[in-house]
Amino acid sequence: MRAEPQIRSFSLRPAPGQARLVPEPYPATPVWGFNGQVPGPELRVRQGDRLRIVVTNGLDEETTVHWHGLRLPNAMDGVPHLTQKPIAPGETFTYEFDAIDAGTFWYHPHQRSFEQVGRGLAGPLIIDESNPPRVDRDVTWLLDDWRLTRDAAIADDFGAAMDMSHAGRLGNTVTINGRVPDVFVVRQGERIRLRLINAANARIFALDFGDLSARIIALDGQPITPHAAPDGVVVLGPAMRADIMLDCPADPGTTLQIVDRAYRDNEFNLLDVVFDETPLRATPPEWEIALPANPLIEPDLNAARRHEILFTGGMMGAMVERQMGPSQSGSMMGGMMGGVVGGGMWFVNGVAAEGHMLDPFLTLERDASHILQMTNATAFDHPIHLHGHSFRVISRDGVPTEFREWQDTVLIAPREQVEIALVADNPGDWMFHCHILEHQAAGMMGVIRVA
Ligand code: C2O
Ligand code: CU
């Protein structure tokens, strides 16, 4: 017999505030935060709990909260005009849903997210397994990227056409949990479960853990066969998460570095990892690191229906489309159109979403298995996110993936073709979009109906 779920209540109030992103002597930064914090408070529950979250809008504009990566009822998904009325200034909306999957998730507004998230509205949502693997410490790092002026204010150029049509709003200041990181103190032999969340509008991270041992145990909250990060590097597009088992093998007093290598001409030291003078143990523990499975339904690839999705547009888009040949090209003029927020610069199957588009471009038969073959015919990377479901990434450029990872956001490189597979078991109209928030705002989104 199943016990009644335990209800866990939280309240969140998005509002303008201040945060000390950069150390003195810089001034504090005017931000928008949840409950006066950047990032917002870590919401933490146990798998099987029921969350009840009262959101009161303290902004001067409408908002919503989306629970990124959670499989929840459509009406709780937090998409304005699609799943709910936006929350007006001063108004309250109560979200309530069950924590079906354990893992590392996050929350953020879905209303003008390129500005609301960009000003600081994002927070971690952690769902603990009932029997998590043993660790010495469980640490969450919400990574963010800010475009700051000389006096540490957020640059006011949200929605700039240049960002919209290129790689999105890249910043100049990276923070971990709302602070420019300095040092991370560890002990020899310590085992840390490190939960990485990329909350940046546009920045991709490629964190090189160097001589630390980084094994990936989950991506986007979903368990994966534990394996060493390829070349020690963990890649996270915007919105993506990774759970890392970090073992710290160096001698007391050692300093190591975690280096970001995502942009070749702009590698930087994220932080120093300093080994405390007192060792914890001589060698890393031999505890089991695999996570228990979540209740996901396995897609049947033989019976799956196939659907093709083509992404076009952006600067240099027309050029790449020409190289890929006209049959692959959705809109030859896609890259040539300038414009402002909402002006179509990016296209999903030839359509740039504008305003509150509510008509689905694709309907997936409920409870059937589906393969989405997605082609990136642009010159830019795109982290593509589907709401309400997790999917398996089954191939890249026709080559089966080694780990068949479950994700909710998949990073697709320029000209790459990625296949994902899922059982469409969650009825409703679901957003499907690029999580470079400037791309989303400039048309790179659509609605997928599960019915
Ligand atoms: Cu993290 Cu549609 O969003
Ligand atoms: Cu994109």
Image (cartoon, rainbow, N blue to C red):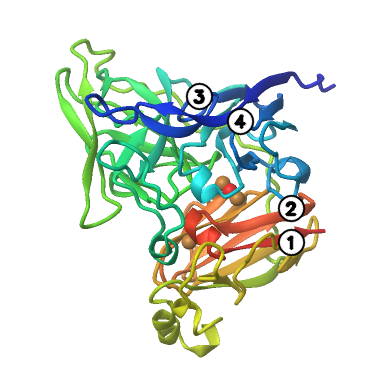
Question: Split into 4 quadrants, where in the image is the C terminus?
Answer: bottom right
In this rendering, the answer to whether 225 lies above or below 416 is: above
| Lower sequence index among marks 4 and 2 | 4
Labelled disc at residue 58: 4
> Disc 3 versus disc 1: distance between alpha carbons?
33 Å
Q: Which mark is in front, 4 or 2?
A: 4
Q: Give residue 18's position: percent from left, percent from top.
A: 42, 27
Q: Amino acid at mark 1?
A: Leu
Q: Amino acid at mark 2?
A: Leu
Q: Which mark is in front, 3 or 4?
A: 4
Q: Are marks 1 and 2 in contact (CB under 8 Å)?
A: yes
Secondary element at image label 2? loop
> Disc 3 versus disc 4: distance between alpha carbons?
10 Å
Q: Is residue 204 left or right of residue 40?
A: left
Q: Give residue 306's position: percent from left, percent from top.
A: 68, 71
Viewer-side residue, 41 vs 427? 41
Q: Which mark is in front, 2 or 3?
A: 3
Query: Which residue lies under the disc numbered 3?
Result: 36
> Disc 2 versus disc 3: distance between alpha carbons?
28 Å
> Disc 4 versus disc 2: distance between alpha carbons?
22 Å
In this rendering, the answer to whether 18 lies above or below 351 is: above
Q: Are marks 4 and 1 in contact (CB under 8 Å)?
A: no
Query: Which residue lies under the disc numbered 1?
Result: 358
Query: Which residue lies under the disc numbered 2?
Result: 82
